[in-house]
Image (cartoon, grey):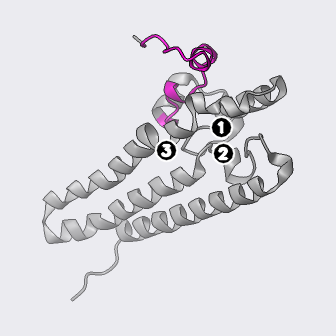
Amino acid sequence: ADPDIGAADIVGFVMIGFGILFQFVADIQKFYFRKDPNNKGKVCDKGVWAVSRHPNYFGEVVIWWGAFVATIRPIQDSGEYWALWTVISPLFTMFLLLFVSGIPLAEGQKLKRFMRTPEARAAFMNYFDSVPPLVPCIPALYKMTPNWAKCLFCCEFPMYAFVEDRQKLNDEGKQPPAEA
């Protein structure tokens, strides 16, 4: 007989559904934002983009953690605890999005596109300082959060910041000095 659905199953399925919905809403909102010619060169700061700089990636992460949570009970029921290694999937997804192919390719020196005018720079820096890169947070609360807490709880890593001096060296074709 099939086991009954338990709390972990429900939580996992809800997380998967929430992640899919969050990712879908983020993609639709960004599509319509970019479609408007008045938004050229501006940062999307409406809807879910007002609480996360990369809400589509947040949705992706929630999907994979939900899938892991949904596997806990079947693993527990089977006694095959070695299968808990499936945690590698959400961890690997987070690693890629936080350090390799996701946020690092969109932020850091790539933010130069928002620094073309003093007004655009000021608007973006206000957004950057008020909105976390991944985990959604109320902007006013995030803005007053200490940097160590932003890094620990909201994945705000120094490599995501635009560094003016490094950009000048890049523009001149020089290599920035190695960081200590």
Q: Which mark is residue 131?
A: 1
Q: Quadrant of the N terminus?
A: bottom left
Q: Which residue is mark 2?
A: 51
Residue drawn 21% across the image and 66% down it = 75
Q: Is residue 159 magenta?
A: yes
Helix, strand or loop at label 3? It is loop
The answer to whether 136 appears left or right of 116 in the picture is: left
Of badges 2 and 3, the one in the foreground is: 3
Q: Position of residue 101 (x, y in %)?
A: 45, 43
Q: Viewer-proximal residue, 41 or 93?
A: 41
Q: Quadrant of the C terminus?
A: top left
Q: Earlier in the sequence, mark 3 or mark 1?
A: 3
What is the C-alpha distance between the residues marked 3 and 1?
17 Å
Q: Amino acid at mark 1?
A: Val
Q: Viewer-proximal residue, 167 or 73?
A: 167
Q: Residue furthest front?
A: 173
Q: Viewer-proximal residue, 98 or 167?
A: 167
Q: Which residue is mark 3?
A: 102
Q: Are marks 1 and 2 in contact (CB under 8 Å)?
A: yes
Is 135 placed above or below 60 here? above
Q: Position of residue 95 (x, y in %)?
A: 38, 42
Q: Residue 133, located in which quarter of the rendered image? A: top right
Q: Amino acid at mark 3?
A: Gly
Is 90 placed above or below 108 here? below
Q: Earlier in the sequence, mark 1 or mark 2?
A: 2
Q: Position of residue 130 (x, y in %)?
A: 68, 33
Q: Amino acid at mark 2?
A: Val
Residue drawn 21% across the image and 54% down it = 85
Look at the image and give the residue range highlighted in magenta.
153-178
The answer to whether 110 appears left or right of 79 in the picture is: right
